[in-house]
Amino acid sequence: MCVPTMIDEITKSKIAAFSARFREVTQSPFGKDDEIGMLNLMDAASRRAVLGAADHGTVFDLSVDYFIGMPSWTKVGDPGYQIWMTHTPPGSVIDDAMGVGREQERLVAYSGDAISMYTHCGTHIDTLTHFGYNGRIFNGFSAEEHLGSRHWTVAGADKHPPVIARGIMLDVAALHGVDMLPDGYGIGRADLEGCLRRQGIELRPGDVVLVRTGRMRAWPDHTAYAERTPGLALDGAVFLAQGGAILIGTDSLSVEQAPSADPENYNNVHTYLLGEAGVTIMEVAQLEALAGERVYEFAFVGACLRLRGATGAPMRPVVMPLLK
């Protein structure tokens, strides 16, 4: 099976990718105020249907843990993950910050900490604000009108709804009989169609699509994991977006192949999916357990942190296999 050759006209009219124009942001089919793009294909009925068909007793956690030195996007100076203690039991006894005396401080053994990181660190989503064209993002929102001193006023992580949808995993590494795709490999339409046929599943409008490159086999070696990542080529991204995907995720640091195959656009898949197709991206997903169990169709449940106006936010997605 593969993506349906005929999508009905009503559904097609709701898929932004069919209205996309090369290197131009697309007006949302869901109205001038829309801030979530293709996630609008979720509704109460679709959520009930997928959760009703899921094996709630089997849960796969697709997130990675956060730790100092973890692979992250630091190539252009963005900060890596840091954590530090703000309160420790012995320090609280010495400092008596609460002003209750050392005896109470010793009794309660207070620990506290703080973190700092780039919002695209670890398992995370890219919101529609992350990339666009010429100062504009999906649905025509402009930096001139909608970007304040600290963050975007539209389409940020705070507007991102919890995602509860049918999900599929396309195991491209397994298709090619390898543990991990080669550095910089571009996953095209033929690869994705090959996975659908091999795995006996279909792509449906409203799906979350996860693409396995096998890159998690290199985690947490920063160089082996983060440099020259395999990922989607542009025609692969177009295939998934026109098939009605609402969120596309990969197990690598970037959803797309690196370096870019487009000499004029170093992030041609990001700009296409976010700016033209209105499709949310998820990166650094742990897909090895799913691959090991050959779980290719599932209920996907994930919610990001509601960071106001943020271009990205951590997410802890879980999936439950669909009952046979």
Image (cartoon, grey):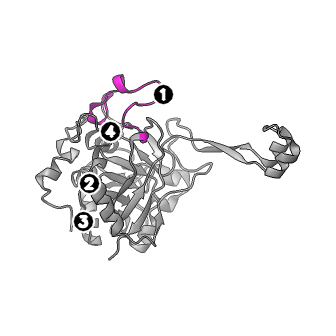
CA separation in Å, label 2 and label 3: 11 Å
Residue 101 spot, x, y in % from top left: 86, 41
Quadrant where the N terminus is found in the figure: bottom left
Res 202 label:
3
Res 240 label:
2
Residue 235 belongs to the span the image colors magenta = no
Which residue occupies the extreme bottom position in the image?
A: 324
Marks 3, 1: nearer the viewer = 1
Which residue appears at 26% of the width and 44% of the height?
277
Q: Which stretch is magenta?
A: 134-158
Marks 3, 4: nearer the viewer = 4
One can see residue 277 in this view: yes
Q: Which residue lies under the disc numbered 1?
A: 150
- Name which of mark 1 and mark 2 comes first in the sequence: 1
Relative placement, left or right, of 22 versus 100 is: left
Q: Which residue lies under the disc numbered 4?
A: 35
Query: Which amino acid is tagged 2?
Result: Leu
Which residue appears at 29% of the width and 38% of the height?
34
Query: Which amino acid is tagged 1?
Result: Arg
- Name which of mark 2 and mark 3 comes first in the sequence: 3
125, 146: nearer the viewer: 146
The kind of secondary structure element at disc 4 is: loop
CA separation in Å, label 4 and label 1: 18 Å
Marks 4, 2: nearer the viewer = 4
